[in-house]
Amino acid sequence: MTDISSAAPSARGGLHPALVASRAQWGLVALLFLLAAAAWWWTFELMRGMDTGPWTALGSFGWFISVWVVMMAAMMFPSVAPTIALYARMSGKSRLLPFVFTGGYLLTWVGAGVVAFLVGGVASRLAGGALSWDRAGRPIAGAVLVMAAGYELTPLKNVCLGKCRSPLGTLLGSWRGGRSGALRMGAKNGAWCVGCCWALMASLFALGVMSVVWMAVVAGFIAVEKVLPWRRTATYGTAVMLLVLGVLVLVAPEALPGLTVPGNDSMTMT
C-alpha cells in the first residue's frame, strides 16, 4: 500500500501527494453520488406505473437483474462511497482499482438478486394462487416485515453492520493486490453488506419492489444505520419502524401511506 501519511511537500514544488489523493477521493465520492442520482432517475422513469404492491411480479430474469443492478447502485452507492474512497486511498495511485472494487461489490449484490429471483419464482410455482394478496400474500408480507425487525437485533446483524461502519480493519485484514484482489475485496465487502441488509431488502419485496417510495424508505434505513453515529439507536429505531410497518400491513394495509394494496385477482411474483 502507498504511504500517504507524510506531510513533506513534493520535490517538484506541486501539491502535496496527500492533498492530491484527498481531492481524488472526493472526486470519486462525488462520482458515486452522481451515479446514484442517475440510477434513481432511471429507476423512477422505468418503474412509473409498475408498482402493484407487495410481491409485485418480477418479470423475466434478464429484465429483473438489469433493474436490480441499477436499484442497488441507487440505494447502496451513497452509503458505501466512504468505503470505496478509503480503498482508493489505500490502493495508491491506481485510478482503475477503485472501480474494480466497486464492480466486485455490485457483483455480490447481483448474486443476492439471483437468489431473490429464484426464491420468488420457486415459491410462485409451488404455491400458485395461494400467494395472492387476499389469501396468504398479506400475512406473509406482514410476517416478513416483522422478521426483518427481529433480524435488526441479532448478533449477526450487529457483526455485519460493524464491518460496514468500520471498514478500515476489514480492508487491512483482507488486503489483496492487483485487479483480482480489488475484485475479491469488493465482493467480500459486498458480502458483509448483504449480511447487514438482506432483511431490509426482503422488506422491500414485501412492500413493493417496484415502488420508488419504498425503495427510498429502505435506502434511508440503510444510510441511517451505516452513517448515524449512534449505532444502537439507529438499529433499534429501524427495528421499531419495520415492526410498525408489519403490524399495519397485517391489520390495516389501507391506512399505510404509500402502500399499493393489490386487487383480489393480483398474482404474486409470476
Image (cartoon, grey):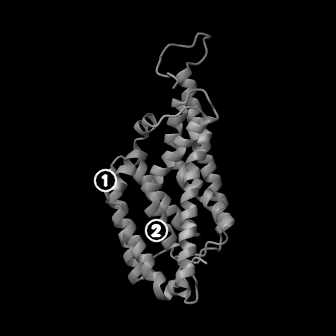
- Local secondary structure at mark 1: helix
Q: Residues within 10 Å of mark 1 (few under 14, many from 20)?
A: some
Q: Mark 2 to mark 1: distance in Å?
A: 20 Å
Q: Is residue 224 above or below residue 58?
A: above
What residue lies at 54% left-to-right and 24% top-to-bottom?
19
Neighbour tally class for label 2: few under 14, some 14-19, many 20 plus, Cα within 10 Å: many
| Mark 2 or mark 1, whichever is nearer to me | 2
The spot of residue 214 in percent (x, y) is 51, 67
The relative height of residue 135 versus residue 33 in the rendered view (above or below) is below
First of labels 2, 1 by sequence position? 2
List x then y, in percent, for residue 256.
45, 77
Residue 234 makes an appearance in the image: no
Task: Name the quadrant of the C terminus.
Answer: bottom right
Left or right: residue 240 compared with residue 33 = left
Q: Pinpoint residue 148: horizontal percent, then vertical percent.
A: 39, 66
Q: Nearer the viewer, residue 13 or 77?
A: 77
Residue that appears at 57% across and 61% down = 113
- At x 42%, y 55%, the residue is 196
Write the residue at 42% across / 81% down: 139
Marking on residue 203: 2
Task: Compare residues 43 and 190 and report the one nearer the observer.
Answer: 190
Left or right of 106, for residue 227: left
Q: Quadrant of residue 28?
A: top right
In which quarter of the view is residue 234 placed?
Answer: bottom left
Q: The disc labelled 1 sits on which kind of residue? A: Arg
Judging by the rendered image, the residue that carries numbered circle 1 is 232
> Which residue type does callout 2 highlight?
Ser
